[in-house]
Amino acid sequence: MSKLSIELPGLSLKNPIIPASGCFGFGREYSQFYDLSKLGAIMIKATTPEPRFGNPTPRVAETDAGMLNAIGLQNPGLKKVISEELTWLSNHDVPIIANIAGSQIEDYVKVAREISQASNVHALELNISCPNVKEGGITFGTDPEVAKKVTKAVKDVSSVPVYVKLSPNVTNIVEMAKAVEAGGADGLTMINTLVGMRLHLKTGKPIIANRTGGLSGPAIKPVALRMIYEVSQQTSLPIIGMGGITNAEDVIEFFYAGASAVAVGTANFVDPFVCPTIIDELPALLDELGFDHISQCTGRSWK
Amino acid sequence: MSKLSIELPGLSLKNPIIPASGCFGFGREYSQFYDLSKLGAIMIKATTPEPRFGNPTPRVAETDAGMLNAIGLQNPGLKKVISEELTWLSNHDVPIIANIAGSQIEDYVKVAREISQASNVHALELNISCPNVKEGGITFGTDPEVAKKVTKAVKDVSSVPVYVKLSPNVTNIVEMAKAVEAGGADGLTMINTLVGMRLHLKTGKPIIANRTGGLSGPAIKPVALRMIYEVSQQTSLPIIGMGGITNAEDVIEFFYAGASAVAVGTANFVDPFVCPTIIDELPALLDELGFDHISQCTGRSWK
Amino acid sequence: MIVKETMKVLSHKELAPAIFELTLQGQLVEEMKQPGQFVHVKTSDGLDPLLRRPISICSFNQHEQSFTMIYRAGGKGTKLLSRKTETETVDVLGPLGNGFPVDAVESGETALLVGGGIGVPPLYQLSQMLVAKGVQVIHVLGFETKSAVFYEREFAALGETYIATVDGSHGTKGFVTDVMKDLADSYKAIYSCGPTPMLKALEAGYSDKPLYLSLEERMGCGVGACFACVCHSGEGSSYKKICSDGPVFRAGEVIL
Amino acid sequence: MIVKETMKVLSHKELAPAIFELTLQGQLVEEMKQPGQFVHVKTSDGLDPLLRRPISICSFNQHEQSFTMIYRAGGKGTKLLSRKTETETVDVLGPLGNGFPVDAVESGETALLVGGGIGVPPLYQLSQMLVAKGVQVIHVLGFETKSAVFYEREFAALGETYIATVDGSHGTKGFVTDVMKDLADSYKAIYSCGPTPMLKALEAGYSDKPLYLSLEERMGCGVGACFACVCHSGEGSSYKKICSDGPVFRAGEVIL
Ligand SMILES: Cc1cc2nc3c(=O)[nH]c(=O)nc-3n(C[C@H](O)[C@H](O)[C@H](O)COP(=O)(O)OP(=O)(O)OC[C@H]3O[C@@H](n4cnc5c(N)ncnc54)[C@H](O)[C@@H]3O)c2cc1C
Ligand SMILES: Cc1cc2nc3c(=O)[nH]c(=O)nc-3n(C[C@H](O)[C@H](O)[C@H](O)COP(=O)(O)OP(=O)(O)OC[C@H]3O[C@@H](n4cnc5c(N)ncnc54)[C@H](O)[C@@H]3O)c2cc1C
Ligand SMILES: Cc1cc2nc3c(=O)[nH]c(=O)nc-3n(C[C@H](O)[C@H](O)[C@H](O)COP(=O)(O)O)c2cc1C
Ligand SMILES: Cc1cc2nc3c(=O)[nH]c(=O)nc-3n(C[C@H](O)[C@H](O)[C@H](O)COP(=O)(O)O)c2cc1C
Ligand code: FES
Ligand code: FES
């Protein structure tokens, strides 16, 4: 499987396939289906300083080739994530990328400082792009100055490399990427969800209680690819790409655009085995396309 | 059919179904399938002062529940559009909304002044949101100040009401809407396409010669609905909604979000009869939902 | 264990307008133990529609490795599902969640099973298993109208069965609670599945006995990973996931 | 007239690995007059995949109201199409575009038909119609390899037929042009359909005779409305639409 190994800041990945944050909980559920050690890494559910219940239900709605979610960062809080979830995960041979969130810079700093100490947390994913919370979240991810500031603050306290997760809901994604690069980011993950909405035919009201939600799934893949294509040419940061990946061909397409690894979100709901299936299928697909190693695919669209 | 009649600035529509600009040429092709007089109005292909060939091919690529296009505003130029296309269209009992484009403000002004004189042009649609041209197009549609300026310039010379077509590729759609409202717009049309990309599995290169293209079709519907929902609550301008509409239920959903009429684009390629089919199906759907008139649906999500 | 399997369609028929009974065969059935669990069904091969649909297990037969579900073909996914024929297969993930506790009632005692509309199906396996262990069952089943009624005979074969229809076209006019108020309260526990207003009415009026409620919510993963289907279970941020902690809860365990 | 019709599958078989021959029946066939036109096919009911697929008409039979297409199941849409069975239907829009001019060659004269790979099919109807009016036909058909060859016998029944394969596993080793350079140039016109490099080679080497080329391009509408499929036809902004002005053009009419 050495065709698939990837080295990124803080991360030695057996393969570049990572379940996306929020789509895989803390791994427990999917460990019923396969050995989590098979995965390149795991991006755990966003963690905030305190436990959060999140938004009222309904929290999801289906859309054509996609879905909306407005979970609202539900999580058991920093303490429990460290003592229970990360401890449980440490029995698996898989690096953890901890997705961290908050309502104010201090929240990010607090979570970053503590969670980055956990022995199996090899990198942080700074979630400044969650569209489903009133405070924090996306507001940090749409203003370059604020994004830079929070990146810097987190970098200062983190004992592992910091990847910043970019929001696609911006006019100029390159500007955002450059801002967090200037803030000291070690890498980028992109994209988070596009803000969308569905309305109920009978009542006329939003299907999601939070009214709007984040659009994920294959519908957003072309937007993700375009943004990765643009950003990978304009910054020197490695990119973990995501947005609608459902099969091995999609993975290659994200690499071509400029990604060095990928995350798989929504597709886990459709097929709980999607990650190991992709991992198994990649080597043959690389052979067919004539690549010795998957890293040869990175940025091929513009190199 | 009085359940479906709609009055908008400059437009007395038999029904609120309008083929979207660029997806219906100048109507000739679809007149092979049905009588164009059946339509609420027609948004003709973007017109520029001079003839344009547009971008190299391939110009389209399929995506999940959507497609990318980078036509590049191909059109026969203002003179021919007026003398040939609009003249031909004047034999049909259907108001025309002329989509106008250009590389600089002077282009918009020139096209607006002349095309708005045509007797069957009842409104202009100011295309400041085309993602597929190097100059003009989207650059006018992402900066509120520029958008306001071009709106005002066009308003000054147009003899018919001016609808401004908004780009979804912005951080803050409400700000853009307010800017063009301040510029004197009579209405809004939204949304244009999201910028996206697809890469070829074999070559690694972009499928579309122009590299990136505009994403349209059902994939973008949730984004369109969300933006219309936001903008309709924050401005007093009527909105012609579009983005992924394929059936009568979709039309109602756009009305609920805040639209007063809708345009149908990509769906024409899948089913050339989609517009008349929707028009035929709407009255029964309104009955089923308990509405006497379709205008009762407008803004129901937030009213 | 949760299994994902491409199962064979054994039979598929329309029981009432838009109400379909689908029987599938496969090894996944071996994992079914409890009544009231559900499966997550992919209704088409491709991306349209994208998500799985949660449908209750109506009954299962270990011997034939088959199980039956009853569903309403209402939206896009279920309408597509309803077109599947006996030559075809269906992609099923399951069994999911925790169902009704059969051991809450002892042999010789009586249990009341209350179902509303498309919430009726999971009560059928429950009733069979209760009867098998010697429990007496009373069924109160609510529907919109006479034509929407299904499985009346099947339930009647297991025990006393009362029907309520909203328009009074069959059985008692009104809701299940209109039937229940006239029943002697000789039963030990109530098991129920149906629309939230019905569950709320039961919780309000019948919490003196053990009362089990099967809940519904829009789902993403169906396995407890996405936090789409949570409900409050007390103060603050405490919660239960309907898909993996439920869908059946004891009244009071969660906030409806 | 262009018609949209849900057509019946009469037969469907695999001629060579991943190459399928599909025969459909319906009234739309009444509108087919010219060889070289195409249809726009919806390969699934829903949105996945979204767009229609342009496929050439290989032959049509007015009497039986049927027509045949031959296609490679390569991508998502054509792979789905290849699963259609004889109990099913296919949504077809057509006939589209302008085909090969049969009257460019007179009875008693000879025509050369040059096809490459999946460009071969439309030449079959053309050949039949030329033969019917008394034209002598010579076919030069290029394929990748022996196993990819289809319709050799069918073409041979109509006239002299030469095969070229890139790997030399059948017929002449090389390209169609390797066959053509050895042919007496007794023919009056060349009709061709195949990959762009082949068409370019023909245009470069054989423009002294009337030469007709059938072009391909990614399409949106297929009917001339979206400007997806244009090609330059001279200086400045002059253009032709492949879907509605073509797909067949006379060499020189458009820039390859
Ligand atoms: C645990 C559980 C058990 C269920 N058991 C049954 C059953 O036995 N028989 C039956 O007919 N129905 C049952 N339902 C409801 C069933 O899941 C929905 O009717 C179905 O998902 C609707 O899909 P659709 O394709 O018809 O509608 P669409 O409108 O196409 O659905 C769009 C999206 O909304 C979701 N959705 C829509 N309505 C509901 C709903 N009421 N509950 C949950 N999700 C919904 C769908 O799953 C899908 O993700 C159950 C639901 C749950 C949660
Ligand atoms: C006028 C015309 C006639 C054709 N006749 C035939 C024929 O008789 N037999 C045959 O096998 N093929 C023919 N083709 C090519 C055929 O259209 C493509 O192979 C097919 O569209 C690919 O679809 P897919 O689902 O396999 O691939 P996908 O990769 O799923 O296609 C994705 C998108 O790209 C488009 N696309 C991909 N490749 C091509 C291509 N080569 N040409 C045009 N669009 C493409 C598809 O139409 C679709 O919109 C013809 C093309 C044209 C333009
Ligand atoms: C249900 C759900 C919950 C999510 N929660 C988070 C989260 O907590 N933190 C985060 O950074 N992204 C979250 N995301 C976004 C995903 O990590 C991912 O960026 C996005 O869904 C695009 O990938 P996909 O199309 O493969 O799902 C969530 C997405 C979904 C669907
Ligand atoms: C092939 C194509 C060409 C288009 N050309 C134009 C154009 O010339 N001017 C314009 O304002 N919008 C143009 N659009 C955008 C559409 O008018 C519409 O805003 C968009 O496609 C969303 O609607 P849909 O999802 O129904 O297609 C074009 C879209 C497509 C697919
Ligand atoms: S549906 Fe994902 S947690 Fe219940
Ligand atoms: S495909 Fe639309 S113009 Fe040819």
Image (cartoon, coloured by chain):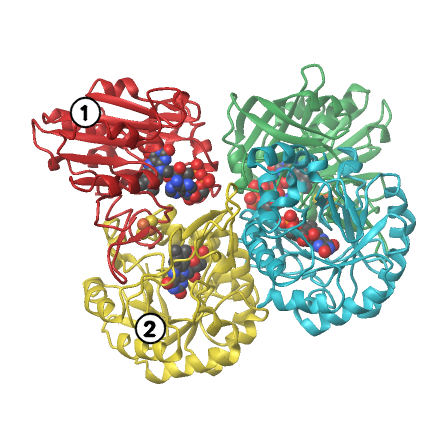
Chain colours: A yellow, B cyan, C red, D green
Percent x, y of residue C185: 16, 31
Residue D171 visible at all: no
Amino acid at dot 1: His
Looking at the image, which residue is at 44% across and 26% down? C18
Residue A163: quarter of image: bottom left
Rendered residue at 80%/37% (across/down): B37
**Picture layout, residue A221 above or below residue C171:** below
Q: Are marks 2 and 1 on the same chain?
A: no
Does any portion of residue B275 appear in the rendered image? yes
Looking at the rendered structure, the secondary structure element under dot 2 is strand
Q: Position of residue A281 (x, y in %)?
A: 38, 50
Q: Which residue is mark 2?
A: A123
Left or right: C23 with respect to D161? left
Q: Position of residue A33 (x, y in %)?
A: 26, 48
Residue D153 in the image: x percent, y percent?
A: 62, 24
- Please, what secondary structure does the residue beneath circle 1 have? loop
Count the labels in the image. 2
* Up-down relation of residue B82 to residue A165 (above or below): above
Q: Amino acid at mark 2?
A: Ala
What residue would you read off at disc 1? C63
Furthest residue toward front: C182
Instruction: Give the farthest residue toward the top.
Output: D63
Within 10 Å of the Cα at label 1, are there few (<14), some (14-19), or many (20+) other Cα atoms? few
Alpha carbon distance from label 2 to label 1: 50 Å
Q: Seen in the image, is C25 located left or right of residue B285?
A: left
